[in-house]
Amino acid sequence: MRPDVEAAAFYLMILDELLEKRRSIVDTNKSTIRDLVIPIDRYPHLNENQTLQEAIQSFMSFRAGQQERPHYAMLFVVNDLNQLVGKLYLMDIMHGLAPALLKGTRVEKFEGQEGDYLDLAPLYETSTFTECGKNRDKPIKPLIHSIDFSFPADTHILKALVMMSKRNESDIPVTDDGTIIGVLRLEEIFMAMCNTYCSIP
């Protein structure tokens, strides 16, 4: 075989390999977030009528690592029809357990000099522990944050990544026909990106 024909055949073979790799990456079925979703029964969630105590138990049932720390910093809240109605963060539970200690600290943005209150917080130890015990049976409903954004299950992975970055959120609910089916976390996007788009040849 002539050298120029041999070189052309070699380049065609390389091109075929690259095109095949490209096809596998952009395969529509593999490029959506559907397969990355954590099913709702494997992600901490509560009914809106449950209590702070039940929220604590839900967080504690999803633990990981040597220190058995809570694996998530947020859980989703659904109604009796399993429709997503909101989300609850660990700090929300703290506000529910110790509202007297934390009142006035729930602000979107802090500007200005801190007062002396933070330095006096340890003086509230006894009353805070007493209050925590009494508030465990209070409902979570007043603490719930509304959900104003979700991904349809057929959202493209890259679109999901851009939207998560834009909103500065790492856990987004995923719906199918209007019903929540689970949660997309940044960790799953990270793994998908590293194993496909950003993989080392």
Image: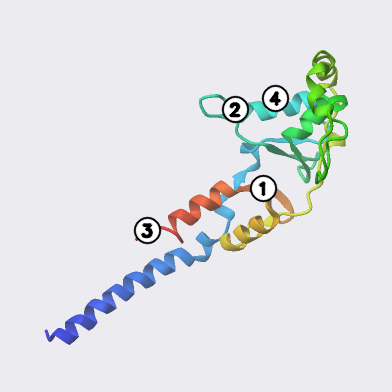
Residue 127 at x, y = what percent?
85, 15
Residue 111 at x, y = what percent?
82, 45
Q: What residue is disc 3 on?
A: 200
- Specify which label sits upstream in the sequence, 2 or 3: 2
* Amino acid at circle 2: Arg
* Amino acid at circle 3: Ile
| Other-residue count near label 2 (Cα within 10 Å), few / some / many at <14 / 14–19 / ≥20 | few
Asked whether 103 or 156 is in front, the reply is 103
Between circles 4 and 3, the one closer to the viewer is: 3
Q: What residue is disc 1 on?
A: 181
Instruction: Give me the residue at 61% from left, 63% from top.
Output: 159
* Amino acid at circle 1: Ile
- Residue 57 has which mark? 4
Residue 64 at x, y = what percent?
55, 30
Give left or right: position of 198 versus 33: left
Asked whether 97 or 110 is in front, the reply is 110
- Specify which label sits upstream in the sequence, 4 or 3: 4
> How far apart are the alpha carbons under marks 4 and 1?
22 Å
| Other-residue count near label 3 (Cα within 10 Å), few / some / many at <14 / 14–19 / ≥20 | few
**In the image, is residue 76 above or below residue 65?**
below
> How far apart are the alpha carbons under marks 1 and 2?
25 Å
